[in-house]
Amino acid sequence: MSSRIVEKCSKIIKEKGWNIAFAESVTAGRMCFEFSMTEDSGDILRGGIACYEVFVKEQVLHVPHTTIEKCTPESAEVTQVLAQQAAKIFNTKITVAVTGLASPGGSETREKPVGTIFFYIITPTDKIKHREIFHGSPEEIVLQAIDRTAELILVNLEVYNQ
């Protein structure tokens, strides 16, 4: 069962007659899965791409190799390109991309510790860039990132409603 915030986000997207798709690295498809478990999934969910490995980012979503080399696969810059490319593929009103570090072994540094998640969300009214550091097990970090995504979308849509 999806979290309440994901349920609420799905309901609002449906009320607007919009749809959503995902390009997921750190969450590896879990975000798309969580949205698929809502009662409104059939009306809103276009799909998603799990782009965990660099090869998929480069070959399927056309992130330039130079961007990955310069910024690392888990970065705001790569996340933005993932969102832009997924928006073209899925032709959605809302496109979400997420990269980050849920466990050791990636590009973590003192400035970018494990738990750092990068979000880039494209809506009809805005482009939302967000970076946040979460704490907990890899699964807890992923679930927190999913809920934060729903919150970021809801905040954007509520501003749009006013």
Image: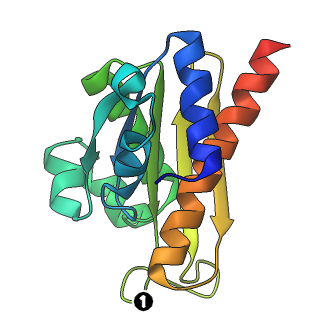
> What secondary structure is found at the residue carrying circle 1?
loop
Q: Residue furthest top?
A: 17
Residue 111 lies left or right of residue 24; in this view the side is right
In the picture shown, does residue 14 fall above or below 79? Answer: above
Badge 1 amino acid: Pro
Residue 162 or 82: which is nearer the viewer?
A: 162
The residue located at (63%, 48%) in the rendering is 4
Q: Is residue 102 visible?
A: no
In the picture shown, does residue 124 fall above or below 38? Answer: above
To which quarter of the image does residue 151 belong? top right
- The percent coordinates of residue 16 (x first, y second) are 58, 12
- The percent coordinates of residue 81 (x first, y second) are 40, 41
Residue 2 or 88: which is nearer the viewer?
A: 2
Residue 66 or 92: which is nearer the viewer?
A: 92
The residue located at (40%, 67%) in the rendering is 72
- The percent coordinates of residue 43 (x first, y second) are 39, 19
Classify the position of the C terminus by image quarter.
Answer: top right
In the picture shown, does residue 15 fall above or below 75? Answer: above
Please give the residue where the numbered disc 1 appears in the rendered image: 104
To which quarter of the image does residue 110 belong? bottom right
Instruction: Count all numbered tags in the image, as a single digit.
Output: 1
The residue located at (53%, 83%) in the rendering is 114
- The percent coordinates of residue 87 (x first, y second) are 37, 26
Residue 14 lies left or right of residue 36; in this view the side is right
Query: Alpha-carbon neighbours of circle 1 within 10 Å: few (<14), some, or many (≥20)?
Result: few
